Image (cartoon, rainbow, N blue to C red):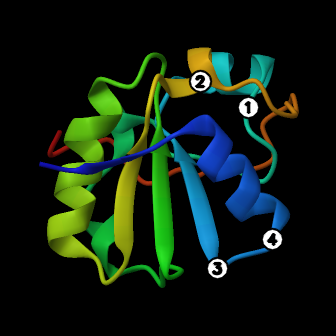
Amino acid sequence: MVAETTPDELRERLADDEDIAVVDIRDPSSYASGHIPDSENLPAATLGPEVFDREWPAEVVVSCYVGKSSKQVASVLDDNVDADVSSLRGGFDAWDGAVEDGSEGEADLGPTSPF
């Protein structure tokens, strides 16, 4: 079972500039409408095996809409990357910290999805 990170815990870790990445798996239009600052948009439908070969920070927190699909993606990442991976409890809906808009962190990783 994948670990969960609360919004408060994530906010503290981001404020401390820890070696952490936030992966937002929502669709690009939802991401563009608002996302956690410095998060990267990797929609679940576009994730492929090449994601596992990337350089990952020490910790990765996966965010979705309400914290359900992020658990599945976090579990797969946790099994395949050298990082502590968790799911954001409650997803973006539970996030009450700062929000950015736009699509700066969006990545095109191809059409294949193992999720």
Disc 3: which residue: 19
The mark lying in front, picked from 2 and 4, is 4
Disc 4: which residue: 16
The mark lying in front, picked from 4 and 3, is 4
The answer to whether marks 1 and 3 mark residues whose Cβ atoms lie closer than 8 Å is: no
Label 4 element class:
loop
Q: Position of residue 75 (x, y in %)?
A: 19, 52
Q: CA distance from mark 1 to mark 3?
A: 19 Å
Q: Residues within 10 Å of mark 4 (few under 14, many from 20)?
A: few
Q: CA distance from mark 4 to mark 1?
A: 19 Å
Q: Position of residue 31 (x, y in %)?
A: 67, 27
Label 1 element class:
loop
Give residue 35's mark: 1
Closer to the chain start, of discs 2 and 4, is 4
The answer to whether marks 1 and 2 mark residues whose Cβ atoms lie closer than 8 Å is: yes
Residue drawn where x is 61% and y is 70% of the image = 20
Q: CA distance from mark 4 to mark 3?
A: 9 Å
Q: Residues within 10 Å of mark 2 (few under 14, many from 20)?
A: many
In which quadrant is the C terminus drawn?
top left
The answer to whether marks 2 and 3 mark residues whose Cβ atoms lie closer than 8 Å is: no
Identified by mark 1, the residue type is His
Closer to the chain start, of discs 4 and 1, is 4
106 or 111, which lies in front? 106
Q: CA distance from mark 2 to mark 4?
A: 20 Å
Q: Quadrant of residue 69?
A: top left
The mark lying in front, picked from 1 and 3, is 3
Disc 2: which residue: 92
Q: Is residue 9 above or below residue 30?
A: below
Q: CA distance from mark 2 to mark 3?
A: 21 Å
Identified by mark 4, the residue type is Asp
**In the picture provided, is 29 more to the left or to the right than 86?**
right
